[in-house]
Amino acid sequence: MVNVTSIRPYNYNIAFNGRIIDSHTHLGKMDNRSYEPDSLTKFHKKQTDNPDEDYVDTFVTSALDGMCRKSDGKYVSNEIEANKNLINTIKSANAQNIIKPLAVCQVDSGNAKNIEKLFDEGDKFYGLKFHPMETQINADDERYNPYMKIAQKRHLPCVFHTETTDGYAAPKRIYELAKRTPEVPVVLYHMCLVPAKSVKDLPEEEIQARGLQNDRDKWCWDVRESWNREGIDVVEQAIKNKDANLYLETSWTKPETMIEAIKRVGADRVLWGTDAPIGDSGENATKENYFANVDKYKAAIKEAFPENAQEIEDKVFFKNAERLFGNKSKKISNNDKAIETVGYAASLAVGIGALTAFIKNISQKKNNKIQFQDNLQLNEKPHKESILQRIIHKFVKKL
Ligand SMILES: [Zn+2]
């Protein structure tokens, strides 16, 4: 019997138009503040009968206390505590279906064996999170290797804070690291974050190199696309060279930068994220603010890609995230996944004596599904389910 909890059968009756997975959020302690699950779940919205209404059903999150430091320079929580606390916080809020944790890795003071142990003890993490600016270790340093190997072994993605300021988290370093385990998906959070200073405080050389000679009075923030592009550049390069599996995430970028990213690296490589409860979707933000922001980015997609806006929105707002962070404890290739789903459903069908018709029907579905996942074609109109299939799907979904 397959492990049914690792399978999310594709439900052919649901219109996914408005679905959102926020691939970058946080919980935990930072600067004497503690962000509890309600700081994310306040943005959570259930799907309504209106297929076009946006709703967030999943937040991919990591522990701030495993990345932030106290005044004595030590992390608020060590590598084990931070991740254990996060799991327990989500459990006690009964939010396991909404908030999906990543394991924070303290490459400077921790040990990959800690993370391995968490997995061995049954804690469920959906990827690994790295913050090279906080660990102050260059992202291409060999000390990241054992952690990346865990991601490789467990078929999990790795997400990185990016920033150019002093080079620890520079996209080009993350690219170098990602080349060592090219099958591991690596997400560049913020594409490449801008330094918190004004343009005139940058070295003259850099002002010239970025073409910001006429922007000296501006904050770097106002011309942040100059930095964001460094993330887009490396992803473009990795696609061309086929030597790393890189993705871009949208928090702290402008809608027009997301559009540039989609044009240059394709909609399959861009993920929606907000950094909530920090930034635009911070502690004072309301659900209305969150969705006003979503509207802004979606409007930009509609304007730039009028022909296939829905397809691109689906990829950026949930399909890519689902593919990367999907609930899996082992690698489920596109074909395996479809076959496992079929195998499980078929075993139920035997019990109710409808095997022949069911297999015929489901194998048609299997074909649709493989095509759907391999080619990422989203425009297929799924065929109607039989009553029997609907009952089985309902049952499988509940497990
Ligand atoms: Zn963040």
Image (cartoon, rainbow, N blue to C red):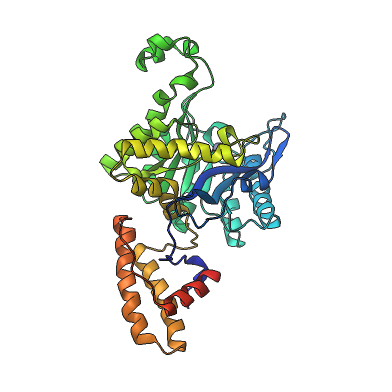
Location of residue 331 (image quadrant): bottom left
- Residue placed furthest toward the bottom: 353
Q: Position of residue 271 (x, y in %)?
A: 43, 43
Relative depth, front residue between 176 and 384: 384
In the displayed structure, would residue 20 be above or below residue 343?
above
On the question of residue 181 being in view, the answer is no
In the displayed structure, would residue 198 be above or below residue 154?
above
- Residue placed furthest toward the left: 240
| Residue located 32% across and 60% down the image | 372
Quadrant occupied by the C terminus: bottom right
Location of residue 265 (image quadrant): top left
Q: Position of residue 323 (x, y in %)?
A: 42, 55
Relative depth, front residue between 334 and 162: 334
Q: Position of residue 120 (x, y in %)?
A: 58, 61
- Residue placed furthest toward the front: 50
| Residue located 42% across and 76% down the image | 389
Q: Is residue 294 left or right of residue 27?
A: left
- Circle count: 0
Q: Position of residue 32 (x, y in %)?
A: 73, 34
| Residue located 30% across and 55% down the image | 377
On the question of residue 360 being in view, the answer is yes
Q: Is residue 239 left or right of residue 16?
A: left
In the displayed structure, would residue 197 be above or below residue 49?
above
Please state the quadrant of the image where ligand 1 appears. Answer: top right
